[in-house]
Image (tube, helix red, strand yellow):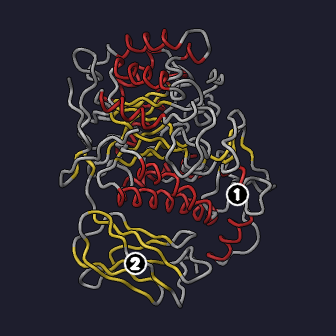
Amino acid sequence: MRPHLPALILPLALLGSVLAAVSQPPLAPPVPALPPAPLAPAPTVPISPAPVSPSGLRGLWVDGFGPGLRTPAEVSRMVSDAAGLGFNTLFVQAIRRGDCLCLLSSVPVAADIQKGFDPLAETIRLAHARHLRVIGWVSVTGAYNSILPSAGKAQVFVQHGPAARDSWLSRKPDGSWQSGADAWLDPGIPASADHMARAAVSLVRAYALDGLQLDRIRYPDGGDWGYSPVTLERYRSETGQTGVPAPSDERWKAWKRDQVTLLARRIALESRALRPGIIISAATIVYGDGPADLNAFQATRSYSEVLQDWPAWMKEGLLDVNVIMNYKRDGVNGQEGWFDRWNAFAASQRVGTGEVAAGTSMYLNSPQVTAAQAGRALGLGLGWVGYAYRTPTGDVYRAAQSQSQGLAALKTAISTVPGLLTEGGAAPVWNVTVQARRAILGRVVGTPQPGGLSVAAYGPDGAQIAGTTTDGSGFYGFTDLPAGRTEVRVGDQSWAEPLSLGVTRFPNLLLRTLTRAGS
């Protein structure tokens, strides 16, 4: 039996022990919307990624929009099925749309799970017994979905929804808030960002998760979101701009992109402060064709529309594992080329021990295409994560095949891919390395508008070594700093101390004068 290995840390440390601890699915699983396929992919130059150590990640997403997590029997079967298929990691939906398929988070318990049952705790217990890792999947900005039952008065959509005086929803210029069946929180609203960070970190505090995956940490599709009155007023105050910016305004887009990155950084640092060695992952956007380089990436929908600068997150060390949602259909308008080019670009962005995995849309493809895509990802040294347990093949998604039939067909197909599984059908051991870093997490207080303030870090020789800005609540962070005494300066305040490996929490800095990044 393969031993369960915690994430390797430099220096080594073991993760904590496991804490003690239904209705039919909708026709369509909750996946990021795919853009309409153009008639032909844009021409790109193939990338030759730098040599990488092959990732041993073989993961399975388990969503909370149908059977799989709602009862003890479903969880038991799901873990058994995943182990039998040869996966070594489960990406289990925990926080869904402002509710949790668990009992111990900061958000209310989902209304469609068995009363008193904790799906997340039971998944961890059973999965660790079968030597599978469990990554808690968080829909960070999720607030509402029309097909889900309400989790009650404590749910964020009830308290801070469209009719609330202090609404936290992301909005379009006309004030509308609904995107299909969903509503999304705005990272630019300080109280909203606080709520999102608190919810994600509450899972790390309460459960012995191996990792945390940040999904939907972005703005919605379309490029015309973020027009909450609170967000607009904050933008104007921090940048000195006037009026209502157009969706195409590059300064406006950059400011919103920064809010997304500030939220990702805060969640990552808060989680690492609580649980050194926890795996921080994100499910990232890769719409359309893959870019040739970083300059071309800035023209993609990932960067310019949903405002998710995940290459910068990788470079900074915010992510230990980037799972790109490379949901493409081989044989349709050249999408197999799109798939390969995104994989190559993502592989080229790896830094240090950071890993990349290709997340594939099993629900859009045949098992044979899924196997071929997984094999091509492995050929670049990437890991593989399949979406999703509930809909493992296109035929299951179209209701032309039962889930059990689909899982059997998937197992047959992936067993033919060299290197995907080991002899006997088991997944290889995933020797993920979580690099220990010297990081700082702090907060600026004492001003009614603590967002957008310039924060600088200085090394022992007095030279500036890093710079950042505060989020809407005054939080700031530095992810990867050199050894030695480090001083942080904000306005007329400063604090200095030597840094050890891990996240050092600096005391709150009370400001009397302000220095805004956008001034």
At 66% across and 42% down in the image, what residue appears? 151
Q: What kind of residue is marked 2? A: Pro
- Going by the image, does 115 lie left or right of 368? right
State the image coordinates of residue 154 (x, y, percent, origin top left): 66, 51
- Closer to us: 289 or 197: 197
User: Residue 36 falls in which quadrant of the image?
Assistant: top right
At 58% across and 42% down in the image, what residue appears? 109
Q: Is there any visible trace of residue 335 in the rendered image?
A: no
Residue 255 vertical position relative to residue 201 in the rendered view, above or below = below
- Going by the image, does 377 lie left or right of 141? left
User: Residue 373 falls in which quadrant of the image?
Assistant: top left
Number of marks in picture: 2
* Badge 2 element: loop
* Badge 1 element: loop
**Numbered badge on residue 507:** 2
State the image coordinates of residue 234 (x, y, percent, origin top left): 66, 71
State the image coordinates of residue 251 (x, y, percent, origin top left): 61, 66
Residue 275 vertical position relative to residue 74 in the rendered view, above or below = below
